[in-house]
Amino acid sequence: MALVHRYLVVFPGRVGGHAPQPSVVVTATGRTGPGGHPVYTDETGRVRVEITEHGTARLLTPTPLHRGPLHAEPLS
């Protein structure tokens, strides 16, 4: 399977909120994470995620935004 170079990672919104869900575009770093999957980062380098071939993202950087798996949509 070919490496996807960019993903849109979507964070869950606030429970009961009706605002758009926060999201960030991440780009491949050329590294692999603890699970053996490619690591991606946003343009600031503050958000680092490991993304599986099934589009599940796991945060590698501590953040108050979310804990647990996230959804990642491949971008062209």
Image (cartoon, rainbow, N blue to C red):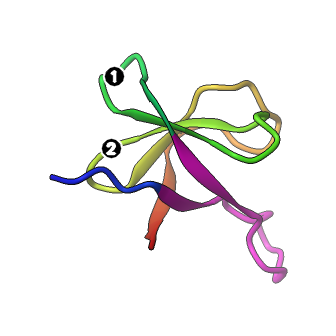
Query: Residue at label 2?
Result: 52
> Callout 2 environment at 10 Å: few (<14), some (14 to 19), or many (20+)?
some
Q: Residue at x 76, y 47 (%)?
A: 43
Query: Residue at label 1?
Result: 35
Q: Is residue 41 left or right of residue 21?
A: left
Pinpoint residue 48: horizontal percent, then vertical percent. 63, 34
Q: Quadrant of residue 33?
A: top left
Residue type for callout 2: Thr
Instruction: Name the secondary structure under disc 2.
Output: loop
Read off the magenta span.
6-28
Pick the residue in front: 7 or 71. 7
> Callout 1 environment at 10 Å: few (<14), some (14 to 19), or many (20+)?
few
Q: Quadrant of residue 8?
A: bottom right
Pick the residue in front: 68 or 76. 76
Q: Is residue 8 magenta?
A: yes
CB atoms of marks 1 and 2 within 8 Å: yes
